[in-house]
Image: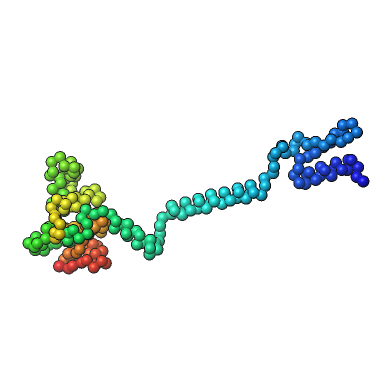
Amino acid sequence: MLGVKAFARIRVLRASFFGLPKVGRRGVGSGIRWYASPAGYKKGEDAPGFKKIFLVALVGTLMFVQAANSLDKNKPKTSFSEEEFENVMNGLKRRVAMFPAGTLNVKFLPSSSESILKTIKAGPAAVIDPIEAVEHFRQQKDGIYEALLNDLKSKYGSDYTKKLPSGMLVMLIGKYMKEKCSMNDEVVIVNFPDTIKDAIKFENEVCTVSKVLVPKIDTDSEVCRYYETVHKVKPL
């Protein structure tokens, strides 16, 4: 049979191995009283269990996945699926234009000679000259754009229409057409557009274009090549 000292030593070793509080003894009379060491766990305090470790790991994983997804959303889009591309294009078409499709028959004449311009003006179409449109708003006393346009003319002279803020020329042409054109009119906008950017902005915000009239000597222009892709070019 084990002695009291050997038994006490076994209890201490077992407590150390399983993480239990250290124990000691003190004699009271002829009996033995066991007590917890002050360095042990407090009452009600347990070592981290499997459930706690599992929950911490799960929360950490969820936070990592969320952060990764957030980074993916902030990456620039470098490619589109066919469906994504169609959604982008449909979004552009949803912009509200000044003139709904079919309201006007609008044609561009990006460049022209005097003879071509004379022929166009002699026809049934209403002719819109961007320079005349801008001048119309510059000369409106107390108009919204009067001060800005007069400042630009004072600074740049007769070429001030080429120095307008980005997008302003398209906007003024659209407003001018609102005042001058009626439903179902045929309209030719001369000497416009100079760039593909203005062409796209016009069709998105003002009106769709049915044809682009191009003299044969200008069929290699940037605007002409752009509209050839949608079969809207008509050589003159």
Q: Is residue 222 left or right of residue 138?
A: right
Side (left or right) of 227 relative to 57: left
| Residue 209 percent location from the top left of the image | 21, 61
**Res 190 seen here:** no
Depth check, front residue: 158 or 186? 186
Give residue 72's position: percent from left, percent from top: 46, 54
Q: Residue 11 lies in what quarter of the image?
A: top right
Nearer to us in this view, 188 or 60: 60
Say if residue 165 shows up in the picture. Answer: yes
The C terminus lies in which quarter of the figure?
bottom left
Which residue in the rendered view is the most extreme toward the left?
122
| Image position of 36 (left or right of 221) | right
Q: Residue furthest top?
A: 29
Q: Residue furthest right?
A: 1
- Image quadrant assignment for residue 145: top left
Question: Where residue 27 sits: x, y (%)?
Answer: 87, 33
- Which residue appears at 72% of the width and 37% of the height? 43
Report the number of discs: 0
Picture colour scheme: rainbow
Which residue is found at the position 67% from the left and 45% from the top? 48
x, y percent for residue 80? 39, 61
Q: Residue at x 16, y 53 (%)?
A: 177
Residue at 9 percent of width and 62 percent of height:
124
Of 207 and 216, nearer the camera is 207
Q: Nearer the viewer, residue 127 or 153?
A: 127
